[in-house]
Image: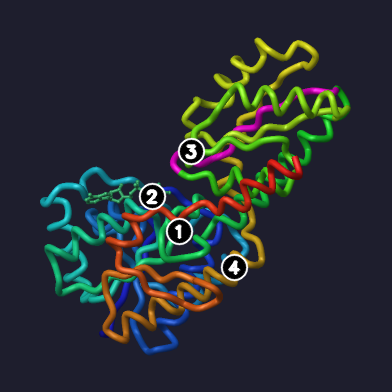
Amino acid sequence: MKNIAVFTSGGDSPGMNACIRAVVRTGLHMGLKVFGIRNGYEGMIDGEIFEMNAHSVSGIIQQGGTILRSARSPRFMTQEGRKRAASNLREQGIEGLVAIGGDGTFTGANVFLGEFPEFSIMGAPGTIDNDLFGTDYTIGYDTAINTAMAAIDNIKDTANAHSRLFFVEVMGRDAGFIALRSAISTGAEAVLIPESKTNVQSLIDTLKDSHSNKKNASIVIVAEGDDAGGAFEIADLVKQHIDYRDVRVTILGHVQRGGRPTCMERVRASQMGVSAVRALLDGESGKMVGIVHRDITYTPFEQAIKHHEEINPALVELVEILG
Ligand code: ATP
């Protein structure tokens, strides 16, 4: 293998740049030509492919977002789009790819490999959701939970000053990892996540208990994909039963996606980038690099996307005991 390419796809996440940098510098270190593809699969179809050097990735390790930009690409869902992408890659002599993205990105990579097995693709898990099977951490997760924690700390100050009940909605359409870690780290009263059925009555009871225990203010963390609805809907239901507190709602939204990656994010993203290139050179393909108990692992795309990493029930219990 002489030429490889790297791209970022789907939702961006802090730490993607550290991973791009690791892929480029490792590739160059191993004597390969390294290309960058702009705008994920869209750029692959449009031929937005350019050669990178060590300088192309200077000064980016500390930046959120992705210098290669990212996109959702409906055209890559079509055979015609994937054909064009393959032909653009062939034109540059690219044989190996590192795809940094989430489950959609790996689904696309798998379909592509089924049609064009002459290419090799390794994935690096880039998503703030931490929902991929086969890794303890995805790139962006650590930064997102720290951003959420800092924002909720700020909300807590004002909640205490006015004895308010706040519902704070964090990202997580299908996964409650961000919500759970945010809840534990900010001392929230309760956390509502998509993985478990929400019982609004028991939430009301918990909040009433904490009021009778003379708690000054309360915070409830809601994952955006919770089965009982979003933070506004749940707050409306609870409001009807709690008249002793002013109830407020904050949706954290996209602030959780941006920002300077944490130290651990940069280190893990670098490890994953280096390992992805090494795996390509070892003849691996169709697998996602992960870190499990400090070890680098390789999980076939089908497994990484099919299984949802499970929520640790002991952590849910922590919120109940400590909140
Ligand atoms: P995030 O977890 O942050 O949403 P993601 O990688 O899951 O990131 P998606 O938008 O779901 O983001 O997927 C990225 C791209 O992968 C899609 O825009 C599409 O181009 C491609 N893709 C997803 N599913 C398929 C598929 N079944 N066939 C071909 N391409 C696909």
Kindly report the distance in space between the C-alpha atoms of the residues bearing marks 1 and 3: 21 Å
| Horizontal relation, residue 258 to residue 50: left or right | right
Tell me whether circle 2 and circle 1 mark residues in contact (CB < 8 Å): yes
Distance of label 3 from label 2 (alpha carbons) = 21 Å
- Which residue is the site of mark 4? 266
Q: Earlier in the sequence, mark 2 or mark 4?
A: 2
Q: Quadrant of the C terminus?
A: top right
Amino acid on which the number 3 mark rests in the picture: Pro
- In the image, residue 256 above or below residue 272: above
Image quadrant assignment for residue 103: bottom left
- The residues bearing labels 3 and 4 have C-alpha atoms spaced at a distance of 29 Å
Which residue position is annotated with label 3? 194
Instruction: Give SS at disc 3.
Output: loop
Ranked by sequence position, the earlier of labels 1 and 3 is 1
Give SS at disc 1: loop
The local crowd at label 1, few if under 14, some if 14 to 19, many if 20 or more residues have their Cα within 10 Å, is many
Drawn side of residue 129 relative to residue 88, left or right: right
Seen in the picture, residue 100 relative to 93 is either above or below; the reply is above
Label 4 residue near ligand 1, CB within 8 Å = no
Q: Which mark is residue 74?
A: none
Q: Position of residue 72 (x, y in %)?
A: 33, 45
Q: Which residue is mark 2?
A: 10
The residue at the point 58 percent across, 23 percent down is 200
Start-end of magenta stretch? 163-174
Residue 281 at x, y = what percent?
A: 32, 85
